Image (cartoon, rainbow, N blue to C red):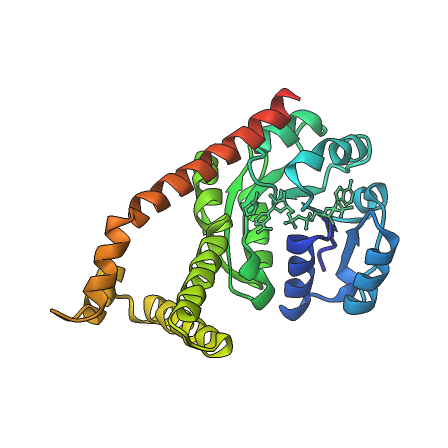
């Protein structure tokens, strides 16, 4: 049994709690911290997991998963620093925050693993990307990998790639939701009932995602199979290219990467 505390049970923290329980972890192994009493009570009722304070979590848990916003990290580090035990492993889910920040603020030798998950964790389909800090051992990295495997896929990368990862898969679901939202609007523009447009686009998204993951075929090959000579799809593709959608995606993801770097710098300099 490994005791795990989720510090900050917001969108990602709650998704992790639910995923760990679905994946077979017992409620007795888990705890969480939450600032609002009402929300804490609601989560305890929903998952049977106790709410604790950050100092209690620091004393009791072997794995401390930090899931507060990057801008809220300072008070959490202040509370953890004097209490964290030598056996504790810190797992940061915070966008932009480097392991070096934790290593500088927490007792010498504290092992830290940086993780970038994403919200499909809620349905057991997360993409979690993990990188060890200076003091994390191979066994600790494997432990984090095992925990996150309960809620989706896990990949290891060097920490230097984590800002790019954050822009790509951390924020990635939002880009797909944005696209789906715009395509549903297109259905409305063409006069379809909203419920029909939603059903058509969501099922097309699920079908396309399943083809991508199950066939192993390259997206270009799959797209070409839909694009008949002299047909409808090529007319749409011409408009997407004319409006610079490919370039917009490159610029958007680069901007997200830059923001991740900025978030890390702001906390390091602050
Ligand atoms: N949402 C996403 O898609 C992803 C988010 N992340 C990262 O996960 C982290 C959390 O994001 P998200 O879940 O979206 O954000 P939320 O705002 O939903 O959750 C953060 C939670 O932390 C709580 N909190 C803040 N300070 C403390 C504290 N001192 N003690 C206890 N709880 C505290 C907040 O409480 P309160 O409501 O009172 O502020 C809130 O419940 C961020 O660092 C983000 O970068 C990573 C990948 C994807
Ligand atoms: O937008 C954000 O900052 C967080 C991190 C990755 C996804 N959501």
Report whether residue 221 is seen.
no
Name the image quarter holding the C terminus. Answer: top right
Residue toward you, 183 or 97: 183
Residue toward you, 102 or 200: 200
On screen, residue 90 versus residue 96, left or right, reads: right
Residue 136: percent from left, percent from top = 58, 39
Name the image quarter holding the N terminus. Answer: bottom right
The residue at 54%/51% (across/down) is 117
Report whether residue 242 is seen.
yes
On screen, residue 239 versus residue 80, left or right, reads: left
| Residue lying farthest to the top in this orientation | 269
Residue 215 in which image quadrant: bottom left
Residue 222: percent from left, percent from top = 24, 67
* Vertical placement of residue 185 versus 12, above or below: below
Q: Ligand 2: which quarter? A: top right
On screen, residue 70 versus residue 192, left or right, reads: right
Residue 216: percent from left, percent from top = 29, 66
The residue at 61%/41% (across/down) is 94
The residue at 24%/65% (across/down) is 223
């Amino acid at each position: 049994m490994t005791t795990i505390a989720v510090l900050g049970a917001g969108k990602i923290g709650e998704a992790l709690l639910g995923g760990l329980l679905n994946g077979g972890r017992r409620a007795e192994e888990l705890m969480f911290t939450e600032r609002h009493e009402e929300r804490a009570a609601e989560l305890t009722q929903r998952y049977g997991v106790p709410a604790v304070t950050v100092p209690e979590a620091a004393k009791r848990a072997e794995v401390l998963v930090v899931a507060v916003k990057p801008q809220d990290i300072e008070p959490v580090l202040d509370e953890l620093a004097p209490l964290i035990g030598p056996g504790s492993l810190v797992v940061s889910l915070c966008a932009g925050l480097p392991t070096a920040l934790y290593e500088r603020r927490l007792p010498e030798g504290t092992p830290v693993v940086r993780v970038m998950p994403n919200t499909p964790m809620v349905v057991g389909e997360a993409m979690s990307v993990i990188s060890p800090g200076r003091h994390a051992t191979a066994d600790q990295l494997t432990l984090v990998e095992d925990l996150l495997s309960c809620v989706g896929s896990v990949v290891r990368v060097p920490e230097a790639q984590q800002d790019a990862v954050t822009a790509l898969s951390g924020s990635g679901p939002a880009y797909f939701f944005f696209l789906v939202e715009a395509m549903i609007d297109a259905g409305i523009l063409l006069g379809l009932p909203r419920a029909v447009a939603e059903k058509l686009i969501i099922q097309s998204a699920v079908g396309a995602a399943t083809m991508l993951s199950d066939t192993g075929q390259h997206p270009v090959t799959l797209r070409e199979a839909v694009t008949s000579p002299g047909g409808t799809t090529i007319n749409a593709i011409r408009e997407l290219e004319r409006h610079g959608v490919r370039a917009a995606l490159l610029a958007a993801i680069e901007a997200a990467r830059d923001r991740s770097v900025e978030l890390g710098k702001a906390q390091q300099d602050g």
